[in-house]
Amino acid sequence: MQLMTTKKSPMLLRYSALISYLVLRASGFVVTDPATVWNQLQPGWNVGNTLDGIPNEDSWGNSPIQAQTFDDIKASGFKSVRIPITWTHHFATEAPDYTIDPTFLARVETVVDQALARGFWVVINVHHDSWEWADLSQSATYWTAVDKFEKLWKQIAKKLNTKSEKLIFESLNEPTGPRPGDKATSDLYNDLNLRFLNIVRNSGGYNKDRITSLPPLHTDITIGNSYFSVPESVAGDKWTYQVHYYTPWSFLAHQWGHTCWGDASERAEMNQLLTDLAGNFTRPKLIGEYGNIGEIGRVLERAAVYNWYDAFVRKAASLNIPVQLWDNGGDHFNRAARVWRDPTVKDIILTASSGKVNTLPECGYSTVWIKSGESTAKDIKLRWNGNTLVGVYTTSGAALQSGTDYTSGANGITLTPSYLATLPSTVGSLGKVVVKSSEGIDLTIEIRRYALPVIATTSYTAPNVNQDLSIPTNFNGATLAAVKAVKADGVFLKNDWTIWLGEPKAGRLDWGDFDYNSNSVIVKSGTLNMIKNSGQTVTLHFEFWPRSDSTNIVPVTISY
């Protein structure tokens, strides 16, 4: 028979392939080509600051991960989850074996199983270990770090080698080293990635066919474009490429009064970076982290954030680059209350991922600011992005009347004086309106009346530098936007180079140098120490929203 020859017939080959496929399918693993399934990861979400917490899962303000959280994220429309894991404090033994605490390893498996059971694509990694002990740029500990990394991954890979094809192994989160990055350090991590691949491929079970995720130094697009080395020596490997995106950091982390985003140059920078990423290497790319740091609407202006998310997710999706939102448990999804802190951000991620067009507010127009005593019409400047207006509604669903309550045009909507006169006369939030368009999100706009905030004490001498200074404040409906710090000689207290940025960024402190609560503006102890060390009186100009009102500023002097 022909089947007895050493050369297998095409029919036998097809039959053998079919049997192999059925066996793997029955056992829960289907060999996949990353390129054909990659769009199934979009959009994704990180369950951050939990299993990656130091030293334990509940050390950073989050309760241990619960299965219901994955139910909630799935119901929200997300398709993949990244589970960051820090292993540093969970070794039962140190050298030479570096045995993982079996209880912790079992806990990781439980969480992985919870996510897989809900149909997610799941990414796990070695997370903050990258800077706790796996910094390969430290020559004195290089070989110790490599040895520990290899033995760690041998145990992880073996423990999870029978999980489905939807489990992805990521070698190391944000490999660290000198900045901005160099070839020599990058090559150390290129070698580590290759070691990781060899370990996974030889760890039994289904791991020889498992998808993996490899980062460049700092998980940085530009550094990776220059120095990431393609591990060609591993034939038939299913590795993919991962970077993170937090650009511009000054906006996303609220530095230097960078409260707006979205001008032509900023959009061009984003588009170029993502285009460069898509065009480099031939493997699928994943942006494993992205997003803002700080509460939207409190630390960050909503409209600017909405525009950033829409532009970023939309561009990445158009390039078939899945993105996974970084969520530390305090910025986006409230796991205890099981609600999104700003549902509009979630909706923007979903609509932009699917290619739907969103109507978005221009920076500063996510809130209609009415100055106390004003009775004029108020604009809501919008980017229609090709949409048409369906209507404007209250949050209870009642329709506002076009021509009577509002007018609309190419640049947005104007609320009429007669409509505004129906709102409460107090300062603070007066309500919200919902703008509905032909496609995309329903855009909620808050309406607030404000007056100049009142700070009772505007001069302080020698406040205690070992604690924050809380300054009683009547906000009168306004909210804090930025703080400009100027020494008596006219030089900025911090980051004096920001003079070249011009207004409204020059001389502004970073969020974290200041804060506020419902009844106080707060000068952090670190800022007080800077003031004391300057040897001069410093004036802090507290700037409130709306920043377009140049009179909405209260100065406070501090001296030692």
Image (tube, rainbow, N blue to C red):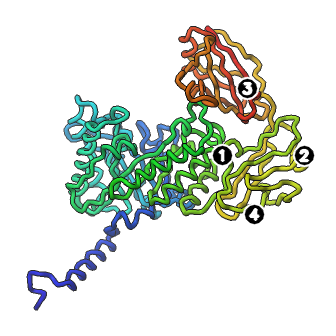
Give the mark nearer the N terminus: 3 vs 4: 4
Query: Residue at the location (56% across, 61% down)?
Result: 75
**Visible residue check, residue 151:** no
Residue 549 horizontal/vertical position (percent): 75, 32
Q: Residues within 10 Å of mark 2 (few under 14, many from 20)?
A: few
532 lies left or right of 377: left
Tag 2 near tag 3, CB within 8 Å: no
411 lies left or right of 12: right
C-alpha separation, residue under disc 1 versus residue under disc 3: 21 Å
C-alpha separation, residue under disc 4 versus residue under disc 2: 24 Å
On screen, residue 19 above or below 547? below
**Visible residue check, residue 361:** yes
Q: Which mark is residue 553?
A: 3
Amino acid on which the number 2 mark rests in the picture = Ala
Q: Which mark is residue 421?
A: 2
Residue 195 horizontal/vertical position (percent): 22, 48
Tag 3 near tag 4, CB within 8 Å: no
Give the mark nearer the N terminus: 2 vs 3: 2
Viewer-proximal residue among 329 and 503: 503
- For disc 4, the marked residue is 390
Res. 451 image quadrant: top right
